[in-house]
Image (cartoon, grey):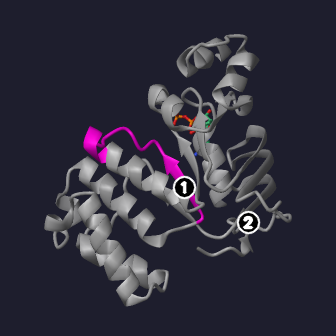
Amino acid sequence: MQTEQTSISTQESVRTSPLNPDELLRVNIERAGYAERDGVIKEIQFSIRPGQLVGLIGPNGAGKSTTVKAMLGLLQDFHGEISMAGTYSYIPEQPILYDQLTLWEHLELAASAWELDQNVFEARAERLLATFRMTEVRHHLPSSFSKGMQQKVMLILAFLHEPALYIVDEPFIGLDPRAIKDFLDMLNEKRKQGAGVLMSTHVLDTAERICDSFLLMNEGRLAARGDLESIQQQCGLPGETLFECFNSLL
Ligand SMILES: Nc1ncnc2c1ncn2[C@@H]1O[C@H](COP(=O)(O)OP(=O)(O)OP(=O)(O)O)[C@@H](O)[C@H]1O
């Protein structure tokens, strides 16, 4: 895993600042949005520590995707700072795959982009294909796969790289229960090795079970943040579920 600090944005307006030793990522978005609609999100500040799984939660239109796009450096309108240690993998909700390449060719292409040693690549690829039960179809075109199988290809590509940080957009819609378990087991293994995770999801019961802490967004701002107990306190609902806390804020 690389440890040098990098900016994950290509925008000149994005500033970075030194991270604390226990930070993998620090986000300080003063204001960000789109060319035709600026300032969609405001005052979004959080950081992620090694091993931490942070849930990004909020109703439709709250600004979760805009926050992720800001972190990835994809927005025209951005004022703030994004600092991170090492590299990241982004797993989008909608798979993005090449029509003409087989699954194995996708993996080879990714390995060559990241300059992975051939033996390391093959060992990781074989293990990931087995874990996600895709070995048999490795020489097939992903364009012929089901939506869930295409999502698994995106997961395999993300894990192949072994980044410092995983940014995951809604992983639970489309994957079957066994694939979700395989994904969470693999994610936990990487967290034990020090990786951090930011996960956007609407599946609140799973989020409540697996996340260390939460960022609750509403109308472009952070409405509450922290672990479940802290969220319950901020919502005035001690002992209640994340679902009830979520609904109380809207
Ligand atoms: N390309 C765009 N151009 C202009 N406005 C946009 C664009 N994409 C999103 N928005 C607006 O930004 C706001 C936040 O949208 P965003 O996609 O970040 O929400 P979200 O929390 O990810 O929602 P969902 O749960 O539905 O995916 C919305 O009001 C939306 O209309």
Magenta highlight range: 164-179
Find disc 1 in the rendering and name its residue: 191
| Image spot of residue 163 (x, y percent) | 55, 67
Task: Pick out the residue farthest to the right.
Answer: 17
* Residue 156, placed above or below residue 183: below
Q: Name the residue: 46% across, 26% down.
A: 205
Q: Tag on residue 73?
A: none
Left or right, 64 with reference to 27? left
Q: Give the class, few, some or many, for how many residues have Cα within 10 Å of label 1's Cα (few <14, many ≥20).
A: some
Left or right, 66 with reference to 191? right
Q: Nearer the viewer, residue 37 or 197?
A: 197
Distance, label 2 to label 1, CA atoms, is 29 Å
Q: Nearer the viewer, residue 52 or 197?
A: 52
Quadrant, the C terminus: top right
Q: Quadrant of residue 11?
A: bottom right
Q: Quadrant of residue 186?
A: bottom left
- Residue 67 visible in the shown view: yes
| Image spot of residue 117 (x, y percent) | 43, 88
Quadrant, the N terminus: bottom right
| Image spot of residue 29 (x, y percent) | 78, 48
Q: Quadrant of residue 158?
A: bottom left
Viewer-nearest of discs 2 and 1: 1
* Residue 122, placed above or below residue 89: below
Q: Which amino acid type corresponds to the residue marked 2 in the rendered image? A: Gln
| Image spot of residue 64 (x, y percent) | 60, 39
Label 2 or label 1, whichever comes before in sequence order = 2
